[in-house]
Amino acid sequence: MISANEYFDGNVKSLGYQSATGKSTLGVMEAGEYEFATSLHETMNVVEGEMLVKLPGSSEWVTYKAGEAYEIEANEKFEVKVSGQTSYLCQYK
């Protein structure tokens, strides 16, 4: 079953699905600043555009571009800034 998700007043939207490798979401973020919380381990793959990310326990912002990925453990918070529409694939463990 495909699920539709919407966050931050519609500025982040995704479609959730189950594949052979597990649960994933494919989404798009509008330009803005966001704080996300995890309940599962996440691997965030940037598909198009770029994200400026501050990972848990870090004070530095790191840029991730299309084709790059980062990981966040379960039960953590992280911050994201995007300057234009950016698409992503988030895979959960």
Image (spheres, helix red, strand yellow):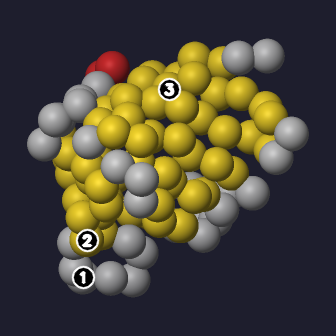
Residue 73: image quadrant is bottom right
* Amino acid at circle 2: Val
According to the picture, the residue beneath numbered tag 1 turns out to be 59
Q: Which residue lies furthest to the left in this view?
A: 83
Residue 29: image quadrant is top left
Identify the secondary structure beneath mark 1: loop
Q: Which of marks 3 and 1 is nearer the N terminus?
A: 3
Q: State yes or no: discs 2 and 3 in contact (Cβ < 8 Å).
A: no
Q: Which of marks 2 and 3 is nearer the N terminus?
A: 3
The alpha-carbon separation of the residues under discs 2 and 3 comes to 23 Å
* Amino acid at circle 1: Ser
Q: Nearer the viewer, residue 36 or 14?
A: 14
Q: Which residue is drawn at 66% across and 62% down?
A: 41
According to the picture, the residue beneath numbered tag 2 turns out to be 62
Neighbours of disc 3 within 10 Å: few (<14), some (14-19), many (20+)? many
According to the picture, the residue beneath numbered tag 3 turns out to be 14
Q: In this view, does 84 lie above or below 82?
A: above
